[in-house]
Image (cartoon, rainbow, N blue to C red):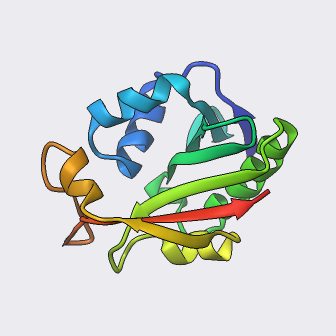
């Protein structure tokens, strides 16, 4: 498995994964141009991806993280995050923030295992920022949990 920065952010393989993590293309199109995209690639196939949005000279945001369905449960997301932490530190960032839905199947435990701490909640984020209701594991996404990690 090779972890790398991506130069062409618009490939169909990447879009399939972007929409796994953030199901409204219009929302992804708003932040993607400003993001640095990183991928886990094996035999020419993108197995996982992550979008990093610089917020300031010291802080970046993990905007989108997805692992291909057939690759889940093998630690690939954790290995990609470790690569991201290193790459972001090398780019001068001292802190990474992330947000995810506050529902039972949300990846909050994953982020906490990776060293993120909860810092707040944005009420009704998914209701106000998406054109249609978003469901994950049968539950409607409403609030966003904010997390951060010192790099």
**Displayed quadrant of residue 121:** bottom left
For the point 59% across and 69% down, which residue is it? Answer: 111
Rendering coords of residue 44 (x, y %): 63, 32
**Where does the C terminus fall, quadrant-wise?**
bottom right
Rendering coords of residue 122 (x, y %): 36, 62
For the point 29% across and 56% down, which residue is it? Answer: 125
The vertical placement of 127 against 52, above or below, is below
The vertical placement of 112 against 25, above or below, is below
Q: Let me know if residue 5 appears in the view.
A: yes
- Asked whether 108 or 120 is in front, the reply is 120
For the point 48% across and 52% down, which residue is it? Answer: 68
Q: Let me know if residue 48 appears in the view.
A: no
> Farthest left residue?
132
The vertical placement of 79 against 17, above or below, is below
Left or right of 137? Residue 48 is right
Rendering coords of residue 19 (x, y %): 35, 42
Rendering coords of residue 3 (x, y %): 74, 42
Number of numbered discs on residues: 0
- Asked whether 125 or 26 is in front, the reply is 125
Left or right of 117? Residue 11 is left
């Amino acid at each position: 498995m090779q972890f790398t920065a991506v130069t062409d952010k618009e490939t169909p393989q990447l879009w399939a994964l972007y929409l796994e993590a953030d199901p409204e293309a219009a929302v992804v199109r708003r932040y993607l141009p400003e993001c640095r995209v990183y991928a886990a690639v094996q035999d020419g196939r993108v197995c996982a991806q992550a979008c990093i949005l610089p917020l300031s000279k010291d802080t970046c945001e993990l905007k989108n993280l997805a692992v291909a369905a057939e690759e889940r449960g093998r630690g690939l997301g954790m290995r990609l995050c470790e690569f991201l932490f290193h790459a972001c530190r090398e780019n001068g960032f001292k802190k990474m923030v992330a947000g995810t839905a506050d529902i039972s199947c949300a990846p909050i435990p994953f982020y906490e295992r990776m060293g993120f701490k909860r810092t707040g909640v944005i009420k009704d984020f998914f209701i106000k920022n998406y054109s249609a209701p978003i469901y994950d594991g049968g539950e409607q996404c409403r609030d966003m949990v904010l997390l951060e990690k010192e790099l």
